[in-house]
Amino acid sequence: MDDMPPATQDAAITAETLLDIEGMHCAGCVGRVEKALVSVPGVTMAAVNLANATARIGGAVDLPDLIAAVEQTGFAASPRDTGALATAGELELGVEGMTCASCVGRVEGALGAVAGVETANVNLANGRARVTLGTGNAGAAALLAAVEQAGYAAHVISDPGAEEREREARAAETLRRDLWTVSLAGLLTLPFVLQMAATPLGLSLALPPWLQWLLASAVQFGAGARFYGPAWRALKAKSGNMELLVVMGTLAAYGLSLWQWAVAEVATPHLYFEASAAVVTLVLLGRVLEARAKRGAAEAMRALGKLRPERAQVLRDGREFQVPTDALVVGDVTLVRPGERFPADGEVIDGATQADESLLTGESRPLDKRLGDAVTGASVNGDGLVQVRITAVGAESALARIARAVEDAQSAKAPVQKMVDRVAAVFVPIVVCIAVVTAVGWLAVGASAETALVNAVTVLVIACPCALGLATPAAIMVGSGVAARHGILIRNAEALEAARDLDLVVFDKTGTLTEGRPQVRLVAAADGQTEDDVLRLTAAVQQGSAHPLAEAIRRAAEERALDLPAISDFQNHTGRGVAAETEGRSLLIGSRRLLEEAGIEITLDAPTDLSGLSEVWIADGGAGRVLGVIGIGDAVRAEAAAAVAALAASGIGAMLLSGDNRASAQAAAEAVGIDRVEAEVLPEGKAEVIAALRAAGHRVAMVGDGINDAPALGAADVGIAMGGGTDVARQTAGITLMSDDPRRVADAIAIADATRRKIKENLFWAFAYNVVALPAAALGLLNPIVAGAAMALSSVSVVTNALRLKRWRPQAEARR
């Protein structure tokens, strides 16, 4: 107990807590632990679960007292990290034991009933639950207890990366175990298959009843033992799941066979042991195939996790050390040799090279990296030896943000899934009712009890809520993973849904269709001023601005080695410009509109040619006169025209929406083939333009990169942020492009549309399967064995169809 962390020693239980218990192996162990826990003063309830080796304790008591009580019984105990959340937040749980859409509905219902839970989304494909908690919530322990009361095991995910690795290891071990189980079940079922195959050929390979019973029992209660626990928990929760249907169907066939054997008047009566054994074997086989397919669907996350190198070369005090990548901190200097991966995000402080960022951004060309340039962790160093100062590690790194975005998309629930959830909630009870009606109906028309029961069993066996539960999350997992591999981050399922039927893409200009590195092309001074005066004063005031045009002016001043005066009273006029005091003057720097609003008439005797340039005016507000103007040009991206053409080929129009002057915006639009331009629009005005377009019947995507684009990104049906843009833009947009190539806009829309089509296809086949199969089973057109095979293949087919998304390629790559 002395080595427990102080936080654990001082913790007190105010409601419920969970302990992991090691060493229990029988019911006697459970009783001993429960008795020890109840004897601790302050404990009001103790429930020990042998299956998942946990103890749930209620009451107000110190945690060390509970652990000591368990240890006195000869077992080891450790607390789960499930303390109550005092403030609002989001919690992610790993849920084990879910197999179908009904399970998802039951877990969501259990979580939603816990005090303080605002939303609960459960994903069958990755076995996770994302819970949004309000203030005053009941805490994580209550959530875990609710899930366990619903019949499942749950734990808090504190480290998604470690959780994914652990889950992958568990999945691999489970798959190996299931392969052995299904192989053994197949061997035991093989004599039944030979017996059935020989009958149409006139051969007699009938097994004696005792051997049929022995083989079927081994399959039914040995290989099929895993179905009984979940089925019993579903019954206790007054709900249903796939396991319950399988258990009811196979036990009915097994029981019917026992009855017929008992009352038979012949030595080899017709029995249905083969149906019992074959259905269990086929369902287990379906589980194995489904698990393999689901591992393929999660391939993107595994690939992301493997990109980062495990170790890094760090320079300290002139010496080189090899350290684990996880041990890097901001400020460390690393040495990266040719061909190695950069261990973390950083900036080049010595040397020059190229970086291959294709696996992160989808950009196929290596990018030059020189002194001061940023590099991204996990990208590949070219042929240069460079020193890199680390600027971001862990959760703040680009790779972690990509992984988090993919996880968010894969954990999200598409709007169409809500309809599926409502169906799944009543699916199993409806199937049971259909089975009962089938049995009664066949008896009513004079069929034998044997025929009625066999057809009812077929109904139970063929119904499969698994396909419904996997249809949407499987497609989202594969689609978002493939998109991420090509530098397209889909943040949520709503973006996939909203990307349907887009007919207009609205582009910002600077940094989106242009390079985003504007340069001063012209400086014109009014009478009494010099060009250096205009540039010097403008650059001084622009020191407080992060706008790309301000950066261009400061670079120009640096190139001329101009000394910048100090400023005071800096003010930002959003979408218009800035103002400040310097050298006894009240300067206004910005657009024509800013000067006009200040009542300053724009008169400039110096000849100027501002056509196609962004105008930055400077005026003395106190004197009420213009001092000069600076013309700034920004080269159009080489790929911009191809991006607009790709959209046009897909039947999607393009529009330019810019806060820049009309001449500059029009010139950029003409260069890329856009004939619809809205210029000199303020940030709030951009959102109004988007709203007006939507009101006119357009489905609009907005593409931008700056803070001033955030309102429009949020107002559009789909917001698409460029990778080099601001954090505000990326957080507002539903889709983020990791590269600055505007051709990725068409690719993002294409993969979103392809994913949505796969969701629709999966849901169609899942519903169509049951619409066709259930009536056929009720009418006696199928037998239990065929039903078992069909049920096993239905969920496999849904995941396999989703895996076809892995073939998707961006348009340019597909053409190559």
Image: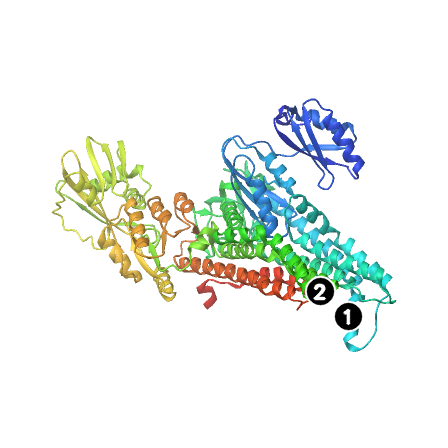
**Which color scheme does this rendered protein use?**
rainbow
* Contact, mark 1 vs mark 2 (Cβ under 8 Å): yes
Examine the rendered structure and indicate whether residue 558 appears above or below residue 771. Answer: above
Among all residues in the image, which is located at the extreme top? 41
- Quadrant assignment, res 528: top left
User: In the image, what residue type sits under mark 1?
Assistant: Met
Residue identifier under label 2: 785
Examine the rendered structure and indicate whether residue 344 appears above or below residue 354. Answer: above
Q: Residue at x 47, y 64 (%)?
A: 813
User: In the image, what residue type sits under mark 2?
Assistant: Ile
Res. 721 in view: no
Res. 435 in view: yes
Where residue 476 sits: x, y (%)? 52, 55
Q: In terms of depth relative to the viewer, which is nearer, 437 or 579?
A: 437
Q: Residue at x 79, y 39 (%)?
A: 25
Judge left or right: residue 567 versus residue 90. left
Among all residues in the image, which is located at the extreme bottom? 202
Residue identifier under label 1: 196
